[in-house]
Image: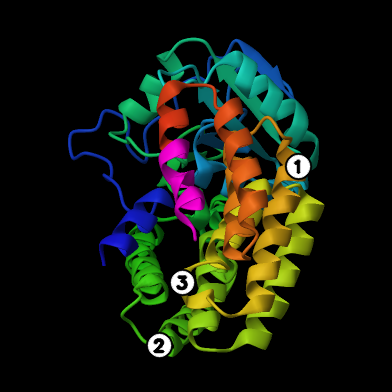
Amino acid sequence: MRKVLVLAAMAGLIGPAGAEDAKLKVGDKAPPVKAARWWQGKEVKSFDAGKVYVVEFWATWCGPCIVMMPHMGALQSQYKDKGVTFVGFTAKDERGNNLEKVQAFVEKRAPKLGYTFAYADDRETYDAWMKAAGRAGIPCCFVVDGAGKVAYIGHPMYLDVVLPKVVEGKWTADDLKGIAAIEKDVDGVFKALLDPKADPETGLKTLAEFEKKYPPLAHIPYFVAPKIGAMIRAKKLDEAKKAAEEVIARAVQQEDAGALQSLSFTLRLPDAKGAKEALALSLTAAEAALKLTGEKDPFALFMVAEAHFANGDVARAKDLGSKAVAVADNEGLKKLLQAEIKKYDDKK
């Protein structure tokens, strides 16, 4: 179960909700967004009356943030003509999220995503929104309604049920309470899919029931790889293969390296041992991700090395593992990778 909780935390499903004494709450006037740089859209100097805004906080090191971006891009396209503006806001931090990294990311990914990005060298806007709302985990989004007030604070995976009502001016306190109930159901699905001791058929059934209950949330990105993993554990290998191939095709089209790496990891979990087609697709997904990120990305190189190792090509795994260590940009990451690839040398 510890694995389930760790993965849930990584996906942003578990984390502190807004504090009771938070300074910024639903119903309050939205603070301004102050940024040093804006890309792919006009600077949001104020929140125009009658228009809806989604201000989402992210960072270049946040995998779960990047996983959500293609879906937010799709929502921006869907709601563009209805006066909705998405802003992906990020700020300099102590984990290496700086202008150079943000600009490189945005220049590569923003054209496909289709929404506005903003960056600040200070933490003023971050503190005015995230800290003031008692939020510590990202991704986290704030929906600002047509009156310039905060209508929703939470994970962007729930925007499919939030945005329609906010845009129509029908969002209520009861709707907000309903999100809490959905969050519990999401947590239940996540645990049912990922608990290695649970019956995978039960996990798949739980997910199917969730999708039937909440049709707008039928394609939460974080469920994609775990669903395929449950198919493999249930020995539904043909279904898993078909689903994996669809994910790879879609992720390549969307230039979504995060989805490819998540899938690659799932397809080489212990449950896939002996499933040659799953292991082969793990390599396909990892190589596609590396092609998108480039060979200066240590994590992408490591993922391809792991896929080769899972497929029995130890020599290739060693070569790519060494390259991953060589391009790692800090000593902590180098040591972590060195520890991980040691098993390649231990393989007899």
> Residue at 65% across / 63% down in the picture?
282
User: Which of the 4 quarters of the picture holds residue 262?
Assistant: bottom right
> For mark 1, what is the residue?
292
In terms of secondary structure, where does tag 3 sit?
Answer: helix
Marks 3 and 2: which is nearer the front? 3
Amino acid identity at mark 2: Thr
Given residues 259 and 274, the one toward you in this image is 274
Residue 299 in percent (x, y) is at: 57, 40
Disc 3 from disc 2: Cα separation: 19 Å
- The disc, 3 or 2, on the residue closer to the chain's N-terminal end is 2
Assign the N terminus to one quadrant of the image.
bottom left
Q: Are marks 3 and 1 in contact (CB under 8 Å)?
A: no
Q: Can residue 265 be seen from the camera position used here?
A: yes
Residue 146 in percent (x, y) is at: 56, 39
Disc 3 from disc 1: Cα separation: 27 Å
Is 239 colored magenta in this rendering?
no
Given residues 250 and 316, the one toward you in this image is 316
Residue 207 in percent (x, y) is at: 47, 79
Residue 266 in percent (x, y) is at: 53, 65
> For mark 2, what is the residue?
202
> Residue at 58% across / 41% down in the picture?
321
> For mark 3, what is the residue?
270
Q: Residues within 10 Å of mark 1 (few under 14, many from 20)?
A: some
Amino acid identity at mark 3: Pro
Describe residue 84's horizontal placement relative to residue 288 as left or right: left
- The disc, 3 or 1, on the residue closer to the chain's N-terminal end is 3
Q: Which residues are magenta?
A: 337-348
Q: Is residue 136 above or below residue 261?
A: above
- Which secondary structure is most common in the magenta stretch? helix
Describe residue 217's horizontal placement relative to residue 15 as left or right: right
- The disc, 1 or 2, on the residue closer to the chain's N-terminal end is 2
